[in-house]
């Protein structure tokens, strides 16, 4: 591999831009293709497919054998609410490989002591979102239980097409949330994208267990994104 | 100036580690899973990076064939020519190095630079 190609690939990955590394398995030459670059022929069509599916693979094109390595941005998780559940969720999300951002305007919650070595903002979500916009590779978890803090980032996540959006609260709490979001102009279809009550139904009964239920639901959403939403694990009840 | 921060290196990203190694003047080989069949433990696209002293980071299997890949990488570093390795239960070498999960993988090993 050309070290310059590796360097450019790492720059793309760092900037959260999708890229495909194309290696000719015959002569070992490699080429970095960014999303939107025009490549013609069978190879171009195969590369386009890899950008869509995110699945790396070996292909035959134009009489040659190529390995196409998909480098899609790593999933990012923004947690609104530096609460007890968040303290359990953070180490898990780090292990799984998510880029993490925690936001809570309440300074008593958002402290270094509670969240060491984590990107933490004791600011209102709207201020943080201005500098850290959400995207399709982002998940948003709103767990402050306070509409003043949770509602706006939930709407922002729906607008950005986040692959996972979850909100803490009982069915009753969520029903009120649905009314408020509708009043903010969010469509019923969009509101249904919100996972509430949050987390897979594993009978979670304390903050750490609820964090496991949320993390599992996020992984499921990430691994099945773009696939049919019918069936699957969301048919059952929810955890919290 | 490298795009690689210390924190990212600590996170164990093989491609960032490879970039750091080459900038530090080391010989570096990159091994990549290019095909899998059956219950392969690491998905296609996974990397193992190896330096000239046999230090390695990342993985191409559940620890079953890394030793064999590292020793092949030493040859690739000295010869400069890439190699396509195949491991599977039907293969005697693979059995010896222990890919006992029933999977089969192809690993491409190349020199960086």
Image (cartoon, coloured by chain):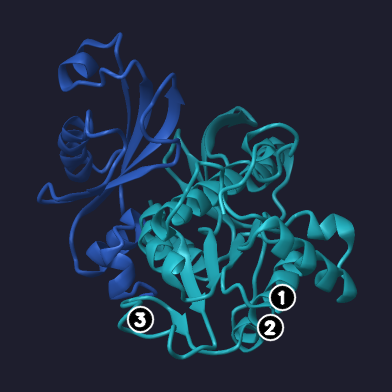
2 and 3 marks on the same chain:
no
SS at circle 2: helix
The residue that mark 1 highlights is: A151
Which chain is indicated by disc 3?
B
Lateral position of residue A46 relative to residue B22, left or right: right
Please provide percent x and percent y for residue A229: 74, 39
SS at circle 3: loop
Numbered disc in front, either 1 or 3: 1
Q: Give me the disc on residue A148.
A: 2
| Residue at left offset 65%, top offset 59% | A170
Which chain is indicated by disc 1?
A
SS at circle 1: helix
The residue that mark 3 highlights is: B1
User: Is there a contact, CB below 8 Å, between mark 2 and mark 3?
Assistant: no
Q: Which chain is cyan?
A: A
Lateral position of residue A234 relative to residue B63, left or right: right
């Amino acid at each position: 591999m050309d070290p310059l190609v590796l360097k450019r690939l790492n720059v793309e990955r760092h900037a959260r831009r999708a890229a495909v590394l194309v290696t000719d398995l015959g002569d070992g030459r490699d080429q970095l293709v960014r999303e939107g670059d025009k490549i013609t022929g069978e190879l171009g069509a195969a590369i386009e497919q890899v950008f869509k599916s995110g699945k790396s693979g070996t292909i035959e094109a134009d009489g040659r054998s190529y390995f196409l390595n998909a480098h899609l941005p790593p999933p990012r998780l923004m947690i609104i609410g530096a609460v007890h559940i968040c303290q359990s969720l953070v180490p898990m999300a780090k292990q799984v490989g998510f880029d993490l951002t925690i936001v809570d305007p309440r300074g008593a919650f958002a402290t270094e002591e509670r969240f060491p070595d984590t990107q933490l903002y004791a600011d209102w979500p709207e201020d943080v979102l201005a500098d850290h916009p959400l995207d399709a590779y982002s998940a948003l978890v709103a767990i402050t239980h306070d509409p003043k803090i949770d509602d706006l980032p939930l709407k922002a996540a729906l607008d950005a097409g986040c692959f996972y959006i979850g909100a803490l609260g009982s069915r009753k709490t969520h029903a009120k949330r649905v009314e408020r979001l509708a009043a903010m102009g969010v469509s019923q279809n969009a509101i249904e994208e919100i996972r509430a009550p949050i987390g897979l139904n594993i009978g979670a009964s304390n903050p750490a267990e609820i964090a496991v239920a949320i993390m599992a639901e996020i992984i499921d959403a990430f691994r099945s994104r773009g696939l049919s939403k019918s069936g699957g694990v969301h048919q059952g009840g929810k955890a919290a | 100036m490298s795009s690689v921060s210390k924190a990212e290196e600590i996170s164990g990203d093989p491609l960032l580690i490879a970039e750091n190694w080459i900038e530090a003047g080391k010989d570096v080989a990159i091994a990549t899973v290019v095909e899998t069949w059956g219950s392969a433990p690491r998905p296609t696209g996974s990397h193992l990076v190896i330096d000239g002293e046999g230090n390695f980071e990342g993985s191409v299997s559940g620890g079953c064939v890394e030793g064999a890949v590292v020793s092949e990488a030493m040859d690739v570093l000295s010869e400069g020519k890439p190699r396509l390795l195949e491991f599977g239960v039907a293969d005697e070498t693979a059995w010896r190095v222990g890919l006992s999960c029933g999977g089969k993988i192809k690993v491409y090993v190349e020199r960086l630079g």
